[in-house]
Amino acid sequence: AQSVTQLGSHVSVSEGALVLLRCNYSSSVPPYLFWYVQYPNQGLQLLLKYTSAATLVKGINGFEAEFKKSETSFHLTKPSAHMSDAAEYFCAVSSPSGGGADGLTFGKGTHLIIQP
Amino acid sequence: NAGVTQTPKFRVLKTGQSMTLLCAQDMNHEYMYWYRQDPGMGLRLIHYSVGEGTTAKGEVPDGYNVSRLKKQNFLLGLESAAPSQTSVYFCASRPPGDLSSYEQYFGPGTRLTVT
């Protein structure tokens, strides 16, 4: 079985400051890992994904994440927060077996608040 | 392309009533999914389908049924709604093949309240 833990249900940063959202996973096999963003009253949008190629993954809107197998982590970062980054962020994991047909396992989400 | 659409956007049901949520996609995707989102719980997979006429249970299937009679549509049914089914429901779809190549595309969600 696989699982995802997101540390911190709410994270508050000042505009222009570093954004760090934490994600740790548990998987019996090397996983695929994803970060999704959800803006208020909208569906989920893929930010970036790790699928066993480069361990440092760059996504949209200036976000990136680094896969660290030794720490079973996939933390999301952005060097300088913008007011438009305020949203809910979800980390998700899937097993590569079967091509991942059986969907994603999501973390509980982290609400990112940007202070002016 | 409209992408993934969901009908209705909002609904209020009384306990014991039934309803069907419709998910439609115009991207010719084989795989489709139903998730529910609850505060502090993230998204949890209810049922999924890897092709027309096939469905499978996800993490939280109890109280729900699904059908995939047409490739473009994935229906989620509640036969006898309960307050515990108050949630936001999301549908997603993607092409077949390895998940490393194909992301899931999500619909805008259906907010359901059961009183």
Image: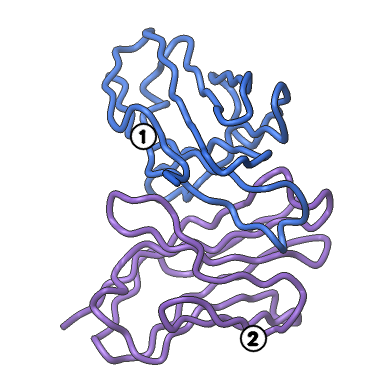
Chain colours: A purple, B blue
At x 79% / y 58%, what residue is drawn? A96
Say which quadrant the C terminus of chain A sits in. bottom left
| Residue count near mark 1 (Cα–Cα under 10 Å), binned few <14, some 14–19, many ≥20 | many
Look at 56% across and 54% down and name the residue there. A106
Q: Which mark is residue A37?
A: none
Q: Are marks 1 and 2 on the same chain?
A: no
Which amino acid type is shown beneath numbered disc 1? Thr
**B26 vs A69, nearest the viewer:** B26
Q: Which residue is tagged 1?
A: B110
Q: Is residue A94 positioned above or below B61 on the image?
A: below
Report whether B61 appears left or right of A63.
right
Q: Is residue A91 left or right of residue B68?
A: left
Query: What amino acid type is highlighted by mark number 2?
Result: Leu
> Residue B79: horizontal and vertical position, in percent?
48, 10
In this orientation, which residue lies closer to the viewer: A56 or B28?
B28
The image shows residue B93 at horizontal and vertical percentages of 58, 43
Picture disc at residue A56:
2
Location of residue B19 by image quarter: top left
Q: Position of residue B92 (x, y in %)?
A: 54, 43
Chain to which mark 2 belongs? A
Extreme-left residue of the structure: A116
Residue beneath the point at 73% across and 45% down: A101
How far apart marks 1 and 2 lie (CA) works out to 35 Å
